[in-house]
Amino acid sequence: MDFNIDRKKVGVGFLIITFLASAAVAITAESQIETQNKQMNMSINVVESGSENTSVGVNADPNLDFGRTQLGTNITKFVNLDTGGNTAYLNVDVTGNISDGLEYKKNMKLEGQEQLRLHYKSTETGNYTGQLGLKIKMPEGSLGEAWHKFKTSIGL
């Protein structure tokens, strides 16, 4: 009996099987990461120094109102986060014109109770608004944790 094996076909078949197996592992690993998205409105009114009485308003609803402040004043707010003892990864995105004067960590690893610090430096008068976007990823198990680390290492 003569068996003629086409090595190119075997190689292509092997590559297809490898690709399908890798895709199955990636899909399984991705399902081990729970993602939550939160959005909060933000605002601040910066006025000339001494132009009027100023105060800082604190709003406990989903809006982060920095209130009114004098030019050159810095204000810090905190967003309290609680992962319930689990490990989570936080990605922060701020949009709108308030983002120019706002300092914050863009990425944080969370374990238990943590605070996101939002520090606003007023450099020009005006009304500034925007949105704070929080993307929270909670890997489930060692496969989810490994998959998250892999995706982060390659910039995904």
Image (cartoon, rainbow, N blue to C red):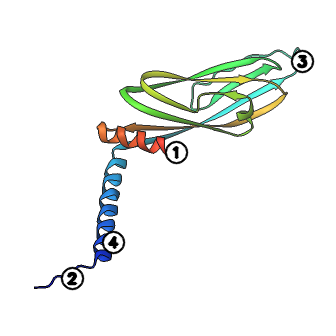
- Identify whether 118 is placed above or below 97: above
The quadrant of the picture occupied by the N terminus is bottom left
Q: Tell me which label, 3 or 2, sits earlier in the chain.
A: 2
- Identify whether 85 is placed above or below 151: above
| In the foreground, 131 or 116 | 116
* Discs 4/2, front: 2
Residue 120 — which label? none
Q: Quadrant of residue 146?
A: top left
What amino acid type is highlighted by mark number 2? Asn
Mark pair 3, 2: CA separation: 91 Å
**Residue marked by disc 1:** 155
**Residue marked by disc 3:** 51
Q: Tell me which label, 3 or 1, sits earlier in the chain.
A: 3
What amino acid type is highlighted by mark number 1? Gly
Instruction: Tell me the element at label 2.
Output: loop
> For the residue carrying disc 2, how many other residues have a C-alpha within 10 Å: few (<14), some (14-19), or many (20+)?
few
Q: Tell me which label, 2 or 1, sits earlier in the chain.
A: 2
Mark pair 4, 2: CA separation: 16 Å
Instruction: Tell me the element at label 1.
Output: loop
**Residue marked by disc 2:** 4
Residue at (78% x, 17% y) in the render: 73
> For the residue carrying disc 3, how many other residues have a C-alpha within 10 Å: few (<14), some (14-19), or many (20+)?
few
**Residue marked by disc 4:** 12
